[in-house]
Amino acid sequence: MTNRKCIAVSDVHLGIECSNRSKFIDFIDNLGDDVDRLVLLGDIFEFWKRDPVGVLLENTDIIQKLMSMEPEINISYVVGNHDFHLIRFPQSYFGVKFDLKHDLGLEYGGTKYRFIHGYQLENMQFGTLATYETFADALCMAGDDVGKAAEIIWEKIGEGRGILDMIRNFLGISRYSSDPHPGATLPWIKERIDEIMLEPEERSMEKYEKYAVELVNEKYKGEFLIYGHSHEPYVKMDKNLANTGSWVWGSSDYLEIDKHGVALKSY
């Protein structure tokens, strides 16, 4: 437990034009002396629409700034679906410095907080968590052309059994069944893929909150859940939920956590 502050931020999507990059740099340069931990809550980098190596090279200034914060400020990095491939770097200098995780537990003021990016809510609608993570990692490695990721994946379905099996597994469909799902035709599968590729602003926020409440009740009982992913910032103390919002299209949302609770702020 600490008497100082934790700052949580997500969905900066560095690497695409709508990222509020310059303001994010100013933000991390001016966190303040009362902050002892910064939680990077996923999708800090954009690997689905860009080549990961190119994005990291373009943002070495930000990476170096973050790395230089310790030991004054501890950095925790919880991977998102758009930067999921970073979890492959745990033994690298990058991985060690950023303490890469799938989720994180912290305690402030006697309250236990659970930090996840929020892609974990997708498997409640689309399939198992492990398969969704495989799918997210594959999209991270598709390169700069992944701006058209849905089309690319769909084209590759006809090229081999591997990617089709991955999609079938993701959607809970067995290839050995003659009638595995009443709607499991190729158009139905394409519809599910298109759903996965929707921008957060195009999705149902009510569903995300519903799934988050279910996750708290089923897996994180007694904890306060903090997540991003949906780009919709809020704090709901009565439900033990908060969302970090985003840093795209002019937004600059973050959460401040201390012994008094959680506060939503904009930089």
Image: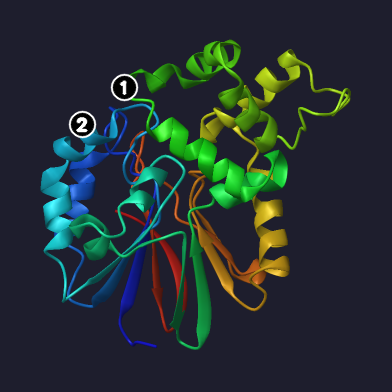
The residue sitting at 16% across, 76% down in the picture is 72
- The residue sitting at 15% across, 67% down in the picture is 69
Direction from residue 191 to residue 178 in the image, left or right: right
Horizontally, is 72 left or right of 2 in the view?
left
The type of residue carrying mark 2 is Gly
State the image quarter where residue 59 is shown: top left
Q: Position of residue 115 (x, y in %)?
A: 48, 65
Count neighbours of disc 1 (C-alpha within 10 A) and say few if under 14, some if 14 to 19, many if 20 or more: some
| Residue at which label 2 appears | 54
Under tag 1, what secondary structure?
helix
Q: Nearer the viewer, residue 101 or 28?
A: 101
Amino acid identity at mark 1: Asp
Position of 258 relative to 243 (above/below) = below
The residue carrying mark 1 is 144
Q: Position of residue 229 (x, y in %)?
A: 50, 46
Q: Name the spot of residue 7 as percent of width and height, x first.
A: 34, 66
- In 3D space, how far apart are the residues under numbered discs 2 and 1 (Cα atoms)? 9 Å
Mark 2 touches mark 1? (CB < 8 Å): yes
Q: From the viewer's perspective, tell me whether residue 16 is left or right of residue 204.
A: left
Q: Quick one: label 2 or label 1, which is nearer the N terminus? A: 2
95 w.r.t. 205: above or below: below
Judging depth in this view, the residue of 234 and 127 nearest the camera is 127
Residue that appears at 61% across and 34% down: 203
Residue located at (33% from left, 87% from top): 3
**In this picture, residue 63 sits left or right of residue 240:** left
